[in-house]
Image (cartoon, rainbow, N blue to C red):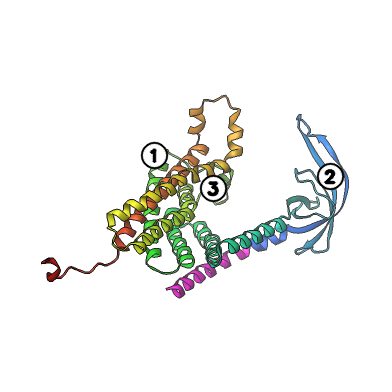
Amino acid sequence: MRTALLVVAIGMLAAPLGAFAQAESSFEESTFLAEVESVGASGTRTVEGTDLTETYQELRVRIIQGAREGEVVSFENATPTQLSEGDRFYLHREPGIFSEGDIWSVWDPDRSGVLLMLVALFVLVSVAVAGMAGVRSLIALATSFALIIFGLVPALSSGFSPVITSIGFGILILALSMFVTHGVNRPTVVALLGSFAALIVAAVLAQLSVTAAKLSGIASDEAAYLSFATAGSIDLIGLLLGGILVGIIGVLNDVSVSQVHTVAELYDANPELSPARVWKKAMRVGREHMGAVINTLPLAYAGVSLPLLLLFSGSTAPFTFIVNREVFAVEIIRALAGSIGLMLSGLVATALAVWLLAPKRPMLSSKDTSK
């Protein structure tokens, strides 16, 4: 079983690699890793025609990676990202028009050091706290992101149905992460069935909500740009639904596995317990867990939308108008549909576990019944 899953995963990872070759080639011709050699004149000035001010600095930089490695470039940096001598950053080249030279600009600072440090700390803490279970979870997490980046994204870019594709990859990611983390056993299979059922319910609920709310799918600059870049060939509403489903996969795993293992432990502690008693005890534990889950997604999405909330906080429009805007309605539907799916996953997983994991009790013989 594990070998088959590994073969499927490798196949899905290998297939889309060629699709990125052309894009990577284009990127290498316009973007380079560079290092600041010196900073010249710098200061602030008023943007012509406005009351706004901007910072600027004259930079002399050396390209340290890419097709133009070793080349030295001087240009003015007027972006909010102000650099110092020795800083590394990504330098962008825009070809000049007619006789003008190339236009150079600061794209982004090189954040690889900070990101790698956090990744290393995350891995260290995961292994130190969770042991081998943490190692297995890290492998499952890496595989899940690989499936999303090299499988789901190219499939959506190729025009496949976002909803069906997201559900398919969601099921695959759930199966791989659960089996790698918890092993191939009856409790894991039961938890997986509960997660599948909840994922389908969340998909249906999200579909109905998005349709009834008449959402266009263009609630962000990224979606608008994607629609323009693909000449409208991407189903943005389907992409929105797919994003909702992908967003709840990880928490579905948590809720379902916790409930199933609670049931398994209850049966293991006392095989004589009736399914009704096990259900009651498991749900007593599960309600506390699912009560915490109610806060999980809404607060997570509120955190992501905090700049937007601040932007609208000074608006004179009434609250009902603001939350009716698509940019807010999308987040509300995303959080509530996902939370409903999470709670249902605990309910369904508990019911399946009580039924499927109950110890097989021997039938009473005629001699026993006569007593």
**Left or right for 39, reference 269:** right
Would you identify the image quadrant in which residue 352 lies? bottom left
Query: Start and end of the magenta stretch?
Result: 1-22
Q: Amino acid at mark 2?
A: Gln
**Left or right for 182, reference 222:** left
Q: Which residue is mark 3?
A: 227
Q: Amino acid at mark 1?
A: Ala
Q: Residue furthest bottom?
A: 3
Q: Give coordinates of residue 11: x percent, y percent.
A: 50, 71
Can you say whether 84 is above or below 185 in the image? above
Q: Amino acid at mark 3?
A: Ser
Q: Which residue is mark 2?
A: 57
**Lower position in the chain sequence, tag 3 or tag 2:** 2
Q: Give coordinates of residue 222: x percent, y percent.
A: 58, 46
Q: Which residue is mark 1?
A: 212
Question: How far is mark 2 from mark 1, CA to CA?
Answer: 51 Å
Q: Residues within 10 Å of mark 2 (few under 14, many from 20)?
A: some
Decide if residue 316 is in sight here. yes
